[in-house]
Amino acid sequence: MTTVRQDVATLGSGWDNKVLYNYALAMRELDKLPITDHNSWKFLGAMHGFDRQLWVEMKVLGDADPVPKDLTNFTYGSQCQHGSWYFLSWHRGYLAAFEAIVAAKVKELTGDAWALPYWNYLNSKDPNARRAPEAFLLDTFDGGPNPLKKYPRRQGFSKLQPSSLDAFSLAAMQENDFQVGNDGSIGFGGGVTGKFAQFARWTGDLENNPHNTVHRLIGGGEGFMADPYLAALDPIFWLHHCNVDRLWEAWMNTAGKTMVRDPRWLDGPSDRRFIMPVPGSATGMKFSGRDTLKGGKLHPSYADLNIGTGVKPGVETVTRVKMGAPEHQSIEPIGANRSVVTVGGAPVRTQVDLARDATHTGIAAMGATAPGEPVTRLYLALESVRGSAPSPQLEVYINLPKDSDPQQHPEYHAGSLTLFGLNVASRPDGGHGGNGLGYTIDITDLAQRLTDAGDFDPDALRVTLVPGEQISADKPVTVERISVLKRSGTVS
Ligand SMILES: [Cu+2]
């Protein structure tokens, strides 16, 4: 790839931003193509997720529009990979295909070269970083409607407005390992799966935050970005994912980070290949994880990997103790609750009974820093989370005093989850039998603080789930199991 992806904020405002002007120009043309064309706006969007009835309802598609078979038989359509270690590699291929098709159109229309820009929304040096690039908010373009604002977003949307507890940060960048343990329940990149799965099981740290959060902050309850079936139709999707992809690239280039080398990741999935359309052709391009890494045909090039990434590629800056090679670390469940938890209109409490000795040794080794010493981290795992809303928000507290208002006690807040794709992952007729989603929340620092304050009982952990956006008595969320995981390693 010869073109370099740049920070959209550095390219000018409004339609003076030439890259976004050309983007709008190309999208207007790609929108004229029918969904049967592999280079059409609709076809590209449907590759992420497709539901004919919903698309007709949302007036994306006409009632009688013919839909190509290769969209509905999972060849091209509904390919997006979430809740698994393929999340980052699949989306990298998806970005490359989209970028190539738009760039070819820009070239044809203007003669300009074009690369997808990224939205650097966590750039702490830019006070306007959270504002959407202006071109996505303008009503008109070139005397007509603005293609970059074609589809609905959260009401009144003009910038990302996370709540004070929202998981909107670069915390994920501190994790040192892409995947830990046999199933990858813990790690930067998501859970292990050998097979194709639109929504698999364990959500990786980066996918959880900022990826999922930003989808909800843009989409709200009514916008396309909140729903995997519609998200990729919004042109802003691509600038968001471009930044997520850049964060992965920055992470891989940082000393002390361990990228996965498992052949199942490099060459998988085992049951099929990922496939992307190419400009002006009906024949697709197949790829696997290997192609997305340095030296591979889908490896991108970014203008900068430092600003707004929370890491300094090339510089040894270990902010968190290394726990040894991922394959030498272990993950052990040290307790679980006893029944399914249903969260509707109000906070719900549940108790996780802990194995006392395992908890004691776990807590004792949390702060280890001397090389060769055993070191642990603690995680809260939420398994098989199900519901019908597309991206509900769930707040998680531990050891919150009984009958107290969670809002008044941020000191017990363990984490905030955006359950992006919950609707798709919970469908029994979906690719994964409605298994729902899984999350792990790092509670090491909180457990340490509670221990220091004498408020951590090694026999039991009290967990409170607080409903946020898109959760109500009518649209509840259920959590099959809540457990505590102890991750053990050796300081290295
Ligand atoms: Cu996404």
Image (cartoon, helix red, strand yellow):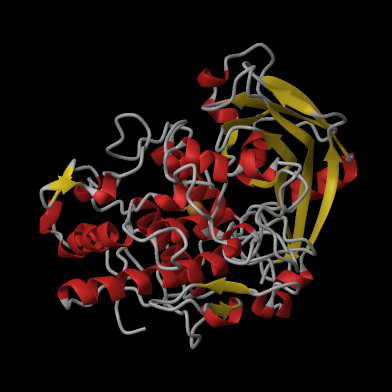
Q: What number of labels is visible?
A: 0
Residue 266 percent across, percent down from the top left: 65, 79
Left or right side of 457 for 473: left
Quadrant in which the N terminus is drawn: bottom left
x, y percentage for residue 150?
Answer: 30, 44
Question: Looking at the figure, which quarter contains the C terminus?
Answer: bottom right
Outermost residue to the front: 64
Q: Nearer the viewer, residue 179 or 62?
A: 62
Who is closer to the viewer here, 45 or 382?
45
> Does 57 sit left or right of 374 as displayed?
left
Q: Quadrant of residue 271?
A: bottom right
Looking at the image, which residue sits at the far top? 403
Relative side of 487 to 206, left or right: right
Residue 189: in sight, yes or no? yes
In front of the other: 138 or 408:
138
Q: Is residue 317 visible?
A: no
In-front residue for pair 201/283: 283
Q: Quadrant of residue 289?
A: bottom right
Q: Is 161 left or right of 148, judged from the image as shown?
A: right
Which residue is at 58% across, 31% downward?
Answer: 395
Q: Position of residue 101 (x, y in %)?
A: 36, 72
Above or below, 43 relative to 486: below
Q: Position of residue 10 (x, y in %)?
A: 19, 61
Determine the residue positioned at 22% across, 77% down: 113
Question: Residue placed farthest to the bottom in the image?
Answer: 295
Residue 98 sits in which quadrant? bottom left
